[in-house]
Amino acid sequence: MRRLFMLAALLIAAGCSKEKEVEPPAELVDIPARIKVARAWDANVGGGEVPLRLGLGVGVEGSRVFAASHGGDVVAFELASGKLLWRTDTKAPLAGGTGADGELVVVGSNEGDVIALDAANGAELWRVRVQGEVLSAPAVSGAGIVVRTVDGRLVALARDDGRVLWTVEQQIPRLTLRGAASPVIGGELAVSGFDNGKVLAASMRDGSVAWESAVAPPRGRTELERLADIDSAVRIKDGDVYAVGFQGRAAMLALDTGQVWWSRDLSSYRGLDVDDDSVFVSTAEGSVVAMRRRTGAELWEQKGLARRGLSAPASIGATVAVADFEGYVHFLDKATGDFVARASSGGTRVSSPPVVAGDLLLVINDDGRITAFRPGA
């Protein structure tokens, strides 16, 4: 299958041409800090010699932080201090992780291996092959583990030994972005976006398809114009699903039926976050957009980070945070979108979504360095 690997193609898809020079990233301007952002701790996962992180974000469960490197290491840190608790070398080229609950830590590899470790000590419990690259974090719940493979399959595995419980497939286009959405488990449903612009929900019990909805239907005449991948995890809140696709739309859907309550044209390959009132999206062009959660009406748009390769946004306190290709973390006022603070996570691109754990914002850069920030009032 032909895949899209190069950033140049993304720029072409975004509307660039041979006749038009690519505009440079927006230059950062000094801002007066309106809140204090404290650096709580730093830690390193390792594996920085291969700066290919893709779906290797951090997972948080209880008082522990879990992360993985492309080189094969899976590590656990203490959330409060960043103290290393254990490290396990899986000897696999990891590319999807980390999914975790109180008992299991689960990661996936470029070669299709899914590996489950004991969350308490890092001991390997089982390893199975799902016959497809795993480029996103598995979802872990009491009902099982759900993995999204790059070839368009949603696979459920048993917690005790990794045996396949069920598989659901979606036909995907010949040309897609490099990546795969992390599945999310909401109640009795596993929900995931796919490279054909659809969001699908399957029963955790038997894999039967509860619904599928076209959120980002392909449009255009060429294969590049018709890219409509949903490569970021959906968000589930109060019985609703929120999703966004590349060259497509952001939408709110009913978790039980898949009915689309609202949608609006918006392009993103990084993703969105949701709080009680708003939906926040990092667009493909580098804007951060806030919308009303119930209606999709735009509240504000911050264009000061154009073309800076933003991460998915993360809602924390009265701010929404995004990181960029130089490792800067930008904090915006939720009410207005104004910049209120900026901090550095080490000078290296941040590809994975920042994760909120209580009053901490956890950022992992492409060298495997984790920084825990505590934004103040």
Image: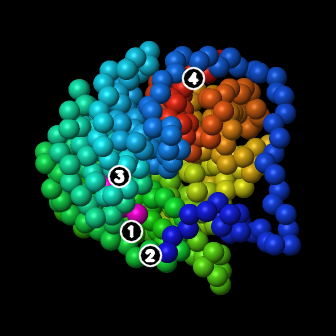
Q: Mark 3 or mark 1, which has the lower sequence index? A: 3
Residue nearest the viewer, comparing 76 with 341: 76
Crowding near the residue tagged with mark 2, few <14, some 14–19, many ≥20 C-alpha atoms within 10 Å: few
Q: Mark 2 or mark 3, which has the lower sequence index? A: 2
The residue drawn where x is 40% and y is 59% is 192
Q: Are marks 2 and 1 in contact (CB under 8 Å)?
A: yes
Q: Is mark 3 on a helix, strand or loop?
A: strand
Q: What element carries label 2?
A: loop
* Residues rendered magenta in the picture: 146-151
Q: In which quarter of the image is the N terminus?
A: bottom left
> Which percent across, then down, holds residue 284?
67, 56
Crowding near the residue tagged with mark 3, few <14, some 14–19, many ≥20 C-alpha atoms within 10 Å: many
Q: Which amino acid does label 3 sit on?
A: Ser
Instruction: Report the residue marked by disc 3.
Output: 109
Extreme residue in the front direction:
49
- Does residue 294 appear in this view? no
